Structure formats: C-alpha cells, structure tokens
Image: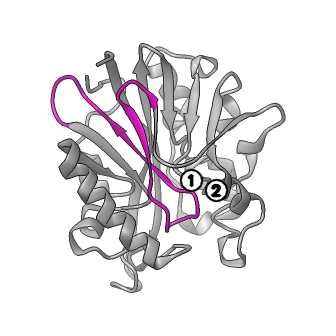
C-alpha cells in the first residue's frame, strides 16, 4: 500500500438548529458545528477532500449561521501549516458543492476537480430549496479543470470514493486505507454526527430522504467491510478528539 499522511484541516465553525442535524429533533436548539477539510499526502500527489467555507460569503449571504473563522483557519493558512502551498494540490474532491464544502476551491488553481455530473448539474440549476446550499459558486472559477466521475472509484492507491447520495444528488464519501491502524471513512454530509449513524436519522436538509437513509446504512456496511472508523462531517465533540493539522495520521 502506498505511504500516505492524513491531515485534518480546521476550517472554523458555524451554527445551525439541531433539527437540521437530526430531522425534526429538538427544534429551536442551536448547535455549533465544525467545518473541516481532509488533506491526503500520497505518493501519487496531494488530494484534498472538501475546502471549507468562505468567511466573506457566509457573512454576506448566511450570517445567521454565525461563522467563526480566524485567519489561521482559512484553507490557505491550513495548507501552509502542513508545509504546502495551494498550487501544490493535485486533486480536489468535494463531497458535494454546498457552500461550506467549496469555499477554498478557487485557490487550488493547479488541481483537477473530480465531480459527479449530477452534483454539478444541481449546483448550477438547483431545486428551489437548494439555493442557499449552493449559494457559493466560486468553485466554478475560470480555468477550473473538471474530471467527471461516476460510481465507486479508487482515485489513488488506497484512496476510494463511494457514492452516498441523498443529502445531495451526487454526494461522495471518502475511504482512506491506512498502513498502521484502522481505515478512515470520511462521511461528508451523508452523516453529520455519530448520532445520525446510530439512530439512522438523516439530516434536516436533504434532496432525497430515502437515499439519505440508504447512504447511512451503506456507510455502516463500508466501515464494517473495511475495518474503518467513520468520521462524521459536523460533530464538534468528535472533532475535538481528532488530530488537527499540522499533526497527522499515517
């Protein structure tokens, strides 16, 4: 298996109602949640999964999500904390194109963006209820290089993308097989928290609730099949126990 290091980049935090974390549960209870990216340093190059949110965009368009992001938590600063410039990233994978997962794409000008055709279509022509989710289109900057992908795919030795739609049309989760220790399965927004997984309750924002439940079940099966630990997207308690850049998993 190819050697690799996994960095978890801290991109700050946002606030949503708990009923958006667990559909219809505890309406009126605000929850602050982390936003992070995953950098895979691989012998085949640098792979970045998700790029966080753009602070100016959120302050302008979604100020009710109460963003907290220091200059050190910007994507470019987090990459440099790991010893890399944005131009060194070779491949970008966005779990999906919601604003809190694409805010740094425009800085990665040398990278190829792997994209589901369905996800790109929904971002460009969203359903009415998806407009705020897809409100940051800066990922589609002039000169961006897209490579369309479909199905489950190994994008580098030991780095897999698995289709987990439901939250959005073309959502992908990422599995990284590790040399030392359990594999790491990054759920993206297919599972905001471990409670989503345990109770099989989907997030409040979704395109297809049936697919969302199926994807939660799929994540659990994948974790069992690959001996993987699942890393949810937006759970502060879990996030605080993980290694953060410049520390890494190997």
SS class of the residue under badge 2? helix
- Is residue 25 one of those drawn in magenta? no
Q: Looking at the image, is mark 1 or mark 2 nearer the viewer?
A: 2
Question: Vertical placement of 102 versus 190: above or below?
Answer: above
Q: On the picture, is 98 further left or further right than 213?
A: right
Question: Vertical placement of 47 versus 221: above or below?
Answer: above
Q: On the picture, is 205 further left or further right than 104?
A: left
Identify which residue, 132 or 230, lies in the foreground.
230
- Is residue 174 one of those drawn in magenta? yes
Identify which residue, 173 or 65, lies in the foreground.
173
Where does label 2 land, which residue? 119
Measured as percent of width and height from the top left, residue 41 is found at 41, 20
Tell me the quadrant of the picture where the N terminus can be found: top left
Residue 117 can be seen, yes or no: yes
Q: Read off the magenta span.
A: 155-182
Residue 104 can be seen, yes or no: no
Circle 2 packing at 10 Å, graded few (<14), some (14-19), many (20+), is many
The disc at residue 178 is none
Where does label 1 land, which residue? 96
The structure residue drawn at horizontal position 54% and vertical position 45%, both measured from the top left corner, is 52
Whether pointer 1 and pointer 2 mark residues with C-beta atoms closer than 8 Å, the reply is: yes
The structure residue drawn at horizontal position 57% and vertical position 22%, both measured from the top left corner, is 89
Question: Vertical placement of 200 versus 221: above or below?
Answer: below
Q: How far apart are marks 1 and 2 (CA)?
A: 7 Å
The structure residue drawn at horizontal position 48% and vertical position 29%, both measured from the top left corner, is 78
Identify which residue, 104 or 207, lies in the foreground.
207
The numbered mark, 1 or 2, whose residue comes first in the sequence reads: 1
The outermost residue toward the front is 151
The outermost residue toward the right is 142
């Amino acid at each position: 298996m190819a050697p690799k290091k996994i960095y978890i980049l801290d991109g700050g935090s946002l606030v949503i109602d708990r009923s958006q974390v667990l559909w219809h549960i505890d309406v009126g209870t605000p929850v602050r949640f982390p936003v992070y990216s995953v950098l895979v340093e691989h012998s085949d190059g640098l792979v970045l999964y998700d790029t966080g949110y753009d602070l100016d965009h959120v302050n302008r368009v979604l100020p009710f999500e109460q963003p907290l992001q220091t200059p050190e938590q910007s994507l470019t600063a987090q990459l440099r904390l790991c010893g890399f410039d944005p131009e060194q990233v070779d491949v970008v994978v966005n779990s999906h194109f919601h604003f809190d997962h694409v805010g740094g794409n425009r800085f990665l000008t040398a990278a190829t963006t792997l994209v589901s055709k369905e996800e790109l279509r929904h971002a460009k022509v969203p359903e009415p209820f998806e407009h705020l989710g897809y409100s940051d289109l800066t990922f589609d900057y002039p000169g961006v290089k897209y490579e369309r992908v479909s199905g489950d795919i190994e994008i580098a030795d030991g780095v897999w993308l698995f289709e987990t739609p439901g939250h959005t049309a073309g959502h992908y989760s990422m599995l990284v097989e590790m040399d030392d220790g359990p594999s790491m399965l990054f759920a993206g927004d297919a599972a905001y928290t471990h409670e989503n997984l345990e109770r099989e309750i989907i997030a409040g924002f979704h395109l297809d609730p049936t697919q969302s439940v199926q994807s939660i079940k799929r994540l659990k099966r994948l974790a069992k099949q690959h001996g993987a630990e699942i890393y949810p997207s937006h759970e502060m308690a879990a996030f605080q126990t993980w290694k953060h850049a410049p520390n890494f998993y190997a």
